[in-house]
Amino acid sequence: MAYLPLRRRASLLCAAAVFASTQLAAETADTIYHGGTILTIDDDNPVVEAVAVADGRILSLGAEAAVLATADGDTRRVDLEGRTLLPGFVDSHGHAYLIGLQAVSANLLPPPDGNGRDIPNLQTLLTNWVEENPETLEQFGWIVGFGYDDSQLAEQRHPTRQELDAVSTEYPVVIIHQSGHLGVGNSKALALAGITAESDDPPGGVIRREAGSSEPNGVLEETGFFQLLLPFIGGLSDELQDSLVVAGTRFAASFGYTTVQEGRAMQMGLDAMRRVAERGDLAVDLVAYPDMLAVQDIAPSLAYQNRFRVGGVKLTIDGSPQGKTAYLSQPYFHPPHGLPADYRGYGAIDEATAMAAVEKAFANGWQILCHANGDAAIDQFIEAVRAARAKYPDVEVRPVLIHGQTLRLDQVDDLKALKIFPSLFPMHTFYWGDWHRESVLGPVRADNISPTGWLLERDMMFGSHHDAPVALPDSMRVLSATVTRRSRSGDILGPEHRVPVATALKALTIWPAWQHFEEDTKGSIEPGKLADFVILSANPLEVPEDALDGIVIEQTIKEDRVIYRR
């Protein structure tokens, strides 16, 4: 559907919210939460003692005695026992379907999220997964590992197909890089994908070769890697596809997310999400953004059906900075082995395709999320939005820049002028901050990745995301990285871009709710909004900043129903 003009839509929603609040005020509470700290993420009323809920929505909040007055004999009282309650987290960018794949694959992540320290260790983890998951292997027919990171391996390189052949020659083996933009296949997987010495590099991708030969070494980038995955994903039954959706959304809920995003849906995943929703098996709200260059079935809506809706479309312009496939305006600090010193990465699509895609989104009134990591790719998105806004000045789709890792200062000004919402990835500072400084970008550019400080100087909203399965959908790790920007080695990357905890909490709640056109029902604890909550073991405003990542998710509550309990 085409979105209403922003002013008219906002006035209608505000009127609806006022009506709902007035109606709720006369009701009796189903549940009252009290006995702890309640952070509302509402600047006008930031901390309260109690919250009353009726019919899955917030009835009232304030002093405990006043809120308890809404109770009767049937009201359930939830004693927080000194813990902290906040609005449920809203996923600014992630991949719910692929989180499910991560959940059922061999965990190859490096510490602290896994044990993928070196190539022999990866081989052991894959072999152990085979022994421990015979039923999954029989269902998949493939050995799949997720999350290896060449920058964290002792060998400082990708594994080869021969090293995966050592795991199995009977089964195809594929391991997915933590960025999700590269991977490695064994000889059988390459054969099933039709990737041989005679294969040309696909547009927007690379098939890496053995030294002095055209023979693939097993490592594939971008569209080349997606070609490797097709035989695996395409061979999954509907039942398995559906199970990935359920597993992914439940896993995200365990980190406090009550609204989850599938930020680049393909047709098979989109079909699975709809089937799961139709059966009533979604515990959280799930918003999908189909890849607009690959999916024809695009029907965005602001209304959920059984907790699912299509929110708009996704466009991908480039790749991954940590994988050195992002499209930069200046060369990489240290280019990948065998590439020239002026290597700047490359685009996944050309500029004409990007311009046409953004114009199509505006013409149809579709919200567009655009993956652009490198500043050259960001330039393309900015110019495409500039042209679309000039052609459709009365259309407001809240365009979103996804990642924006290497945003320049001049580009931040463009984002504000063009009303492009930045969904940034400060968690990179922890996982790849040292790698960016030492190898990818060098010390100057690395300090300014995900430049949240520049945004705050301009009074701009932003989202802070996890991009799972690139990393675990760990909300407290997201919060910690946004506040501290501390790398694995303990260095602080770009101290001027650290933000206060209260601001970082907005980037997990009310600001991504706005991003999704849902600020009137989610993102803060106010009368009439949905009773979507998360209960934390400690108050993030009071613990030392370096201890934020140690806060534990105790419960996740969707519309007054517990969907996760530690």
Image (cartoon, rainbow, N blue to C red):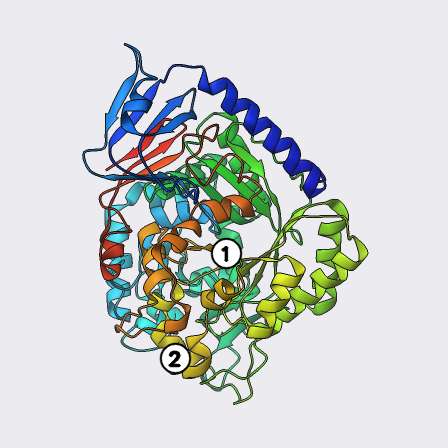
Of the 4 image quadrants, the one containing the N terminus is top right
Between residue 141 and residue 326, name the one nearer to us: 326
In the displayed structure, 186 sits above or below 519; it is below
Can you tell which quarter of the image residue 375 is in? bottom right
Q: Position of residue 53 (x, y in %)?
A: 38, 23
Residue beneath the point at 71% across and 51% down: 361
Q: Which residue is mark 2?
A: 437
Between residue 305 and residue 17, name the one nearer to us: 17
In the displayed structure, 312 sits above or below 415; it is above
**Does dot 1 land on a helix, a strand or a loop?**
loop
Q: Position of residue 441 (x, y in %)?
A: 45, 80
Of the 4 image quadrants, the one containing the C terminus is top left
Q: Position of residue 399 (x, y in %)?
A: 63, 54
Can you tell which quarter of the image residue 31 is in? top left
For label 1, count other residues whose C-alpha is less than 10 Å away and answer few (under 14), some (14-19) or many (20+): many
Q: Which residue is mark 1?
A: 462
Query: What amino acid is at disc 1?
Result: Phe
**Does dot 2 land on a helix, a strand or a loop?**
helix
In the displayed structure, 306 sits above or below 292; it is above
Q: Specify whether 4 is left or right of 109.
A: right
